[in-house]
Image (cartoon, rainbow, N blue to C red):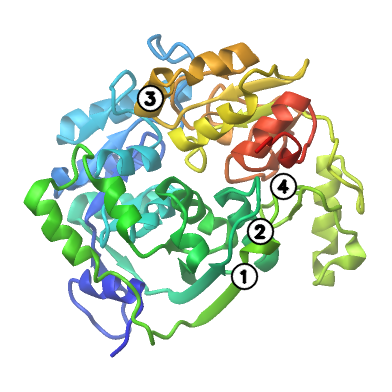
Amino acid sequence: MSRTLFDKIWDSHIVKKKEGYPDPLFIDRHFIHEVTSPQAFDGLKKRGIGVFNTERTTATADHNVPTKDQHLPIKEALSRHQVEALRKNCKDFGVTLYDLGHPFQGIVHIIGPELGLTLPGMTIVCGDSHTSTHGAFGSIAFGIGTSEVEQVLATQCILQYKPKRMKIEINGPLSKGVLAKDIILYIISKISSSGATGYFVEYAGDTIENLSMEARMTICNMSIEMGARGGLIAPDEVTFDYIKGKKFAPQGAELHKKIEQWKTLKSDEDATFDKVLVFDATDIGPMITYGTNPGMGIKITDRIPTPEELKDISEQPSFIKSLNYMGLEPGSQLMGKHIDYVFIGSCTNARIEDLRLVASIVKGKKKAEGVEVWVVPGSKQVEEQARKEGLDKIFEAAGFELRSPGCSACLGMNEDKIPPGKYCISTSNRNFEGRQGPKSRTFLASPLSAAAAAITGRVTDVRELITN
């Protein structure tokens, strides 16, 4: 019987199948952080039980941590309390923690792949929706709630109903200035922020095959923004080359054996999906969002639609409300719109490849007057590599502020908030009302587009700055 990649991984992890009930899935890797784990650990304490498999559980501090002066006590009381609770719980239960100051600390979805903890064929969960990032390795990775975090800590298993399967195929060469972030924003703009609800998405096609691992992670990361349970990409030589040499990945003969197994992790030629979508990469340009959900996106050179142009008339009230919040007019263009802040970071776009792309645009230039630019690496390893390559000097000369690792201004849970009414071009994944701070206004875009805005002080087509 022909099966999809998703089916192969899911079915091989079912502990015991029973019709009419959710599947008990064995979980290969459980990532935890300071926000969604305290209540789960409290539950274990009340029941008098420990963590079932500490070797498969990895913790880091990322959401609430400051990105300046990380060697000092955390100022915000709630953030400090949550990080201290994570430290105590990990010590009490014997869980490995990459705390502030540790060379492996960073955003949970960035440290997993860079440490070789994320591997093909795995089931991976974390109390964070963007766990789907790890699907870029050909794994089933999805976010879970706090009660489910406790369930996995206690049993190394989780009860889940099997989602439907969707295939999104993208073919063709990418145009100049177009990145993986533009691909996923384009797809979401076409199918809406709920277009993949109830599905697990497999991305395929030659456009995907020609992407780096960092770019693939960006795409899988934002599967959630179209309502999907998660996204994955079949592993190939690009995947295997990325894994080689990672600290906790298999080495030598063991790695060779694993690669032979991983080569079987692909959908059968005649596998059936519940839904298939096909897109032409040549139609994708640099993208930007204009509203308050990631589906409200346009090519950076296009204009904002009018209420009459919406496909679904029932969306008009929320559309108008969104534009009012953003201070924008229907039918207007974003090109040339003044920008106050630029945030380059998050689990979507804070890897070394992202920072290199930004540096390639800003080298020898200065940020626009009145624009504040934060560059927040996704991990201590990314930060160290950036300094090793001299990217920190490029950013410093341009007037950018290179900070320490953390989720930072992706979400308003720490000290890095965008002030009320200010406009921010962000490489993160969500543009909800108040996401980056109360009454803040967010445009989602690629690292290249964010870098261009930092230099010009306005929404800019990055192709105007690319010289080759």
State whether residue 41 is above or below residue 296.
above
Crowding near pointer 4: few (<14 within 10 Å), some, many (20+)? many
Q: Secondary structure at mark 4?
A: strand
Crowding near pointer 3: few (<14 within 10 Å), some, many (20+)? some
Residue 421, position as x, y percentages in the image: 79, 30
- Cβ atoms under marks 2 and 1 closer than 8 Å: yes
Cα distance between the residues tagged 3 and 1 = 35 Å
Cα distance between the residues tagged 3 and 2 = 31 Å
Q: Secondary structure at mark 2?
A: helix
Task: Tell me the residue that label 4 is attached to.
Answer: 288
- Cβ atoms under marks 3 and 1 closer than 8 Å: no
Task: Tell me the residue that label 2 is attached to.
Answer: 186
Q: Residue at x 27, y 58 (%)?
A: 120
Cα distance between the residues tagged 2 and 1 = 10 Å
Q: Can see residue 118?
A: no
Q: Residue at x 22, y 69 (%)?
A: 13
Crowding near pointer 2: few (<14 within 10 Å), some, many (20+)? many
Which tag, 2 or 1, sits closer to the chain's start? 2
Q: Judge by depth and name the residue closer to the eye, 418 or 158.
A: 418
In the rendered image, the residue lying farthest to the bottom is 1
Task: Tell me the residue that label 1 is attached to.
Answer: 279
Left or right of residue 392, residue 310 in this image: right
Between disc 1 and disc 4, the foreground one is: 1
Residue type, numbered disc 2: Tyr
In the rendered image, the residue lying farthest to the left is 253
Between disc 2 and disc 1, the foreground one is: 1
Which tag, 3 or 1, sits closer to the chain's start? 1
Task: Tell me the residue that label 3 is attached to.
Answer: 385
